[in-house]
Image (cartoon, rainbow, N blue to C red):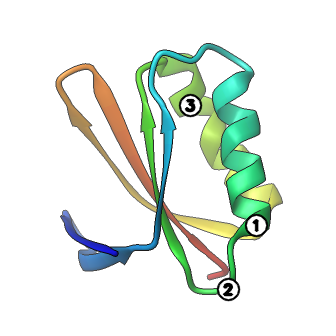
Amino acid sequence: MVEVELPDVGKINVDRVVDCQGMVCPRPQLEVKRAATQMKEGEVAEVLITNPASVEAIPGILKKTGCTLLGKVKEGNVFKLYFKKGT
């Protein structure tokens, strides 16, 4: 478990990492959907993505799988999205 500080959210504990770096649509969306369905209520995931189009598609997938987007951060060419299973 890793602790991360998000703007406007504060410190969160990340339970799993979904590494989608270098993947193109629809692979990142499929990986996020699979991880979201496997997670337990309250768990938090960090998603690493380098494809901007996938970053825009992820929030819709999270909503459909009962997850909440906590925030996103861009570091260089990597987008880091954080989501929690449940609300």
As rendered, which of 50 and 16 lies closer to the eye? 16
Q: Which mark is residue 56?
A: 3
Q: How far apart, in angstroms, are the residues tagged by discs 1 and 2? A: 10 Å
| Secondary structure found at label 2 | loop
Which quarter of the rendering shows the C terminus? bottom right
Q: Indicate left or right for 62 with 71 as reference.
A: right
Q: Is 4 drawn above or below residue 72 in the view shown?
A: below
Q: Position of residue 80 (x, y in %)?
A: 35, 43
Q: How far apart, in angstroms, are the residues tagged by discs 2 and 3? A: 24 Å
| Secondary structure found at label 3 | helix
Give the mark nearer the N terminus: 3 vs 1. 1
Q: Is 57 drawn above or below residue 76 in the view shown?
A: below
Query: Residue beneath label 2, please?
Result: 41
Q: What's under tag 2, amino acid-wise?
A: Glu
- The mark tally for this picture is 3
Q: What residue sits 45% from the left and 72% below the top?
A: 15
Place residue 28 in its image quadrant: top right
Query: Residue beneath label 1, please?
Result: 38
Give the mark nearer the N terminus: 2 vs 3. 2
Which quarter of the rendering shows the N terminus? bottom left
Q: Position of residue 49 (x, y in %)?
A: 45, 30
Q: What's under tag 3, amino acid-wise?
A: Glu
Q: What residue sits 47% from the left and 15% below the top?
A: 22
Q: What residue sits 25% from the left and 35% below the top?
A: 74
Q: Which mark is residue 77?
A: none
